[in-house]
Amino acid sequence: MIYQRLLKIEQELDKQEKEIRDKRLALKSIKKLLTDNIDENYEVIPERSLKKLRYLLEDLKQTGLSEEEIKMINLITDNQN
């Protein structure tokens, strides 16, 4: 009985670690895209517009964004349009 509980807790922690790792990778990807391609001194990053920021990042990445990257954009823009 206790071993089953321990296993369940361990599995939940593993799941949380993976989710955190995925979020960190998405955040690093977004940060790299912006820092490698945008000079904030001369260009405006649409940090309040979900659609505009997503479009910009997809254009910089030259492909669609991952699910985690989209979630990060939602956090960055506070889910604003």
Image (cartoon, rainbow, N blue to C red):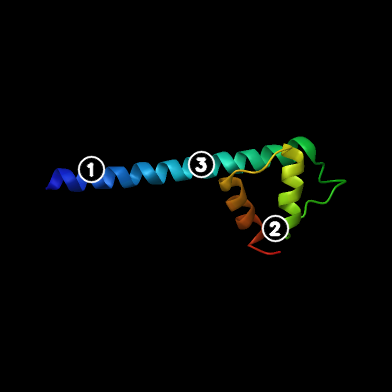
Compared to residue 46, the image places residue 60 above or below, namely: above
Residue at 61 percent of width and 46 percent of height: 69
Residue type (three-letter) at the residue carrying disc 2: Leu
The single residue placed furthest to the left in the displayed view is 1
Mark 3 to mark 1 CA distance (whole Å) = 23 Å
Mark 2, secondary structure of its residue = helix
For the point 76% across and 39% down, the residue is 60
Label 2 Cα neighbours within 10 Å, binned few <14 / some 14-19 / many ≥20: many
As helix, strand or loop, the secondary structure at mark 3 comes to helix
Q: CA distance from mark 1 to mark 2?
A: 40 Å
The kind of residue tagged 1 is Leu
Mark 3 to mark 2 CA distance (whole Å)? 20 Å
Furthest-top residue in this view: 36
9 horizontally vs 54: left or right: left
Residue 27 lies in quadrant? top right
Q: Is residue 72 above or below residue 34?
A: below
Q: Give the image location of residue 12, x and y in percent.
A: 32, 47
SS class, disc 1: helix
Task: Looking at this view, name the residue that lies furthest to the bottom.
Answer: 80
Q: Is residue 40 left or right of residue 10?
A: right
Q: Report if the CB atoms under discs 3 and 1 are less than 8 Å apart.
A: no
Q: Which residue is mark 2?
A: 50
* Residue at 43% in and 41% down: 18
Q: Amino acid at mark 3?
A: Asp
Q: Position of residue 26 (x, y in %)?
A: 58, 42
Instruction: Give the residue number, with chain letter if any, for mark 3.
Output: 22
Residue at the spot of label 1: 7
In the image, farthest residue toward the front: 64
